[in-house]
Amino acid sequence: MNLFSSAREFGRLRELIGILLKYGFDDIVRWLHLEGRAGLLKRWLRQDLPPEIRRLPSEARARLALEEMGPTFVKLGQILATRVDLLPSEWITELEKLQDQAAALPFAQLKPQLERSLGAKVETCFRHIDEAPVGTASMAQVYRAVTQMGEQVVLKIRRPGVEAKIQADLRLLHKLAEIAEAQSAELRRYQPVDVIREFEASLLRELDFSVEARSADRMRENLRALDWVVVPRIYWQWTCDDLNVQEFINGIPAKNIEAMDRAGMDRKLIARRGARAVWKMMLEDGLFHADPHPGNFLILPGNRIAMLDYGMVGRLTATRRDQLIRLIRGVALQEPDTVTQVLVEWSAGRYINREGLLAEVTNLIEQFDGVPMAELDLTALLNAVAAILRNYNLRLPSELTLLAKACVTLEGFGRLIDPGFQLMDEAMPLLRKTLANRYSPKVLARAVRSRALDAVERLYHPGAVPNGNGHGGYAGPPPMQIEELSRLVNRLERASHRQARAVLLAGLFLVSGLMLQLEGGPQFLGMHVLGLISLIGCTGYWIWMLTQLWWTERGHRD
């Protein structure tokens, strides 16, 4: 397989192999059959590892290697730190320490790109730019500025050349993931191709700063009812894919507890408000801040909270939110069948031994027996579910791994501010509201209608609706046969026809009653003859309908 399409990619591959060997990961190089690609570099680096590296555990060496590989791999490690379904806890803990650090470029090197993004000279748009960056990372640098209107703003400028480097690294990662799946059964269970595909989508979204800006706008709109939450305003006249210009907010960093106390802030209230805002995003809005650590919160007068940095966001569809609610309810009410069904849905059609899964789920929820829903540790629950899925070579949906990470981060933020903070306390009102909405008559009616339409769709297009697994091994209810579907549809059609006839008959009775009162024309016993004939006909038709209904029901009982 040709791993590189240019001398530049070949050089980058040699560089990555060298870093792997430097930190003692020659086994990975052998698994991928890349020894020959390293050449003389391999023989030079495969000397004994320095003692300070040799004594480190493998997860710590992996973190150091990823940091040295550059921005793409730092971001990959940060994404893997959310994958509790793929990696054990010690790896998650270590990868969470990854630091996206880079030496700051002089502002003069960024100025030409900034002016291309602005479409004008810097002096035309801004009265002043502080050329000392307030934040530096491998992907972007952040500066404070003042607009010509005197507004204080923050400029997030993408570093020149970073997009091309990331694209090249992504091409290499795709090729390496394909080799890993083909060559190693041990690596194949981690589904590297799917992981890299999800990572690429996430990284490209983060690389486009306009996506981050749109997420901020959407969250500001979603949180409008919470007047104590502040989301920075976006200056769209200047924001584009490589530049994000937003309002500068001056507040107390959430990690500065002493400053909050000096300002007389109510830390308990702030922790509750932060949790309430994030839970609303998760359970109601479906778009949530996936990195709610103290560094992304500023505390403002009046115990208000400013939320910053929307580069990492999570999305939960209505289906995923419904599954999460069912999972929590199933654990709280000790319903293993409900929890098992949710996990089967998360299997994405892969073969799964449902009986074995049910046994593991039963053991799992027994650990939460007697725990009130308000005290349920959602992070521990999702981690336990992820461990079960790993046993079946399945993965937790990526949206839920981000949710689990957000819960861990949010709990750390809450307990930093208020040691007595309980994450689920603020979730309970929203959970009750969501459960009430889930079982409302309107939602139930919509579900019945949807099931009926699915049944009809299966009749006319048997292959259009999946049967639940795609592998023939799904242990759920057996698919309906064509004959059974035909009988069901016929019964639905007959019921619809009877309903239509009943409405028509009611209308005819009404018309007959009006015709009986007509004046002039032939009369009998003071009633108009046409009205009387119509009434007799309607009565006969009504008796015939009752007889037919009785006969049909009698046939079904027999």
Image (cartoon, helix red, strand yellow):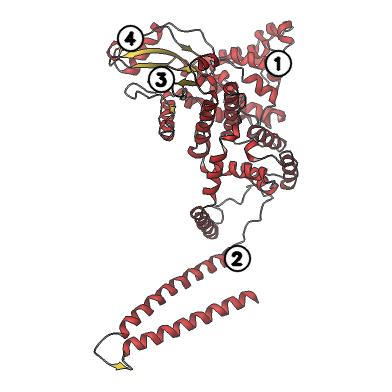
Q: Amino acid at mark 4?
A: His
Q: Viewer-proximal residue, 253 or 479?
A: 253
As displayed, is residue 538 above or below residue 466?
Answer: below
* Closer to viewer: mark 4 or mark 2: 4
As helix, strand or loop, the secondary structure at mark 2 comes to: helix
Check disc 2 and report the residue beneath it: 483
- Which numbered disc, 1 or 4, marks the residue that appears first in the sequence? 1
Q: Is residue 292 left or right of residue 246?
A: right
Q: Position of residue 280 (x, y in %)?
A: 50, 36
User: Which label belongs to residue 242?
Assistant: 3
Check disc 4 and report the residue beneath it: 128
As helix, strand or loop, the secondary structure at mark 4 comes to: strand
Q: Quadrant of the C terminus?
A: bottom right
Q: Is residue 46 visible?
A: yes
Q: Amino acid at mark 3?
A: Asp
- Which numbered disc, 2 or 1, marks the residue that appears first in the sequence? 1
As displayed, is residue 363 above or below residue 206?
Answer: below
- Which numbered disc, 3 or 4, marks the residue that appears first in the sequence? 4
